[in-house]
Image: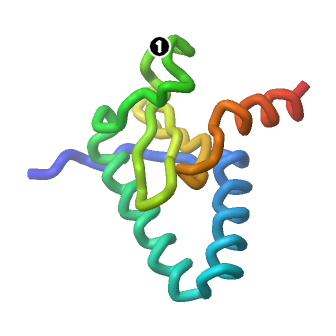
Amino acid sequence: MPAALLNYRILPTARIGLDELRSYVVHSFGWEAWRQTSTQIQDTIAHIRQFPESGHVPVELEGFGDDRYRQALSGKNRIIYQLRNETIFIHLVIDARRDLQALLQRIVLRLM
């Protein structure tokens, strides 16, 4: 019997990333490519919800808040998430080729 799916929340930073990703994919490759990418991301989130420990700690986040921050690859994209109190918090959805450390610095600076 498969494990129960954990609850999840897509945080505002992840929604912004999804919007940027959608805009880029649609502009560069068309709506059908976005539908495929979106489906792949949804499938990856469903996998995370069932097997939250299957992701690995991103190198950029090693030593930051223990090992609750993890990532899963979804095609050419990274999903950065955190398991907290039986809920998955999706923090970021970004192109895997982007510099995660620079992106995190920009986010932190915006919050200050």
Q: Which residue is mark 1?
A: 66
Q: Please report the residue visible at 31 percent of the width from the left and 32 percent of the height from the top.
A: 53
In this rendered view, identify the residue nearer to me: 50 or 98.
Answer: 98
Total numbered labels placed on residues in the image? 1
Q: Classify residue 26 as left or right of residue 87.
A: right
Q: Name the spot of residue 17 as percent of width and height, x first.
A: 68, 55
Q: Classify residue 107 as left or right of residue 99.
A: right
**Quarter location, residue 30:** bottom right
Placement of 16 over or under 66, stated as above or below = below
Q: Classify residue 23 as left or right of residue 81.
A: right
Placement of 82 over or under 74, stated as above or below = above
Q: Name the spot of residue 97 as percent of width and height, x first.
A: 57, 50
SS class of the residue under badge 1?
loop
Q: Name the spot of residue 99 as percent of width and height, x first.
A: 65, 40
In this rendered view, identify the residue nearer to me: 45 or 103.
Answer: 103
Q: Please report the residue visible at 62 percent of the width from the left and 74 percent of the height from the top.
A: 25
State how the image is colored. Answer: rainbow
Placement of 57 over or under 19, stated as above or below = above
Q: Please report the residue visible at 28 percent of the width from the left and 47 percent of the height from the top.
A: 50
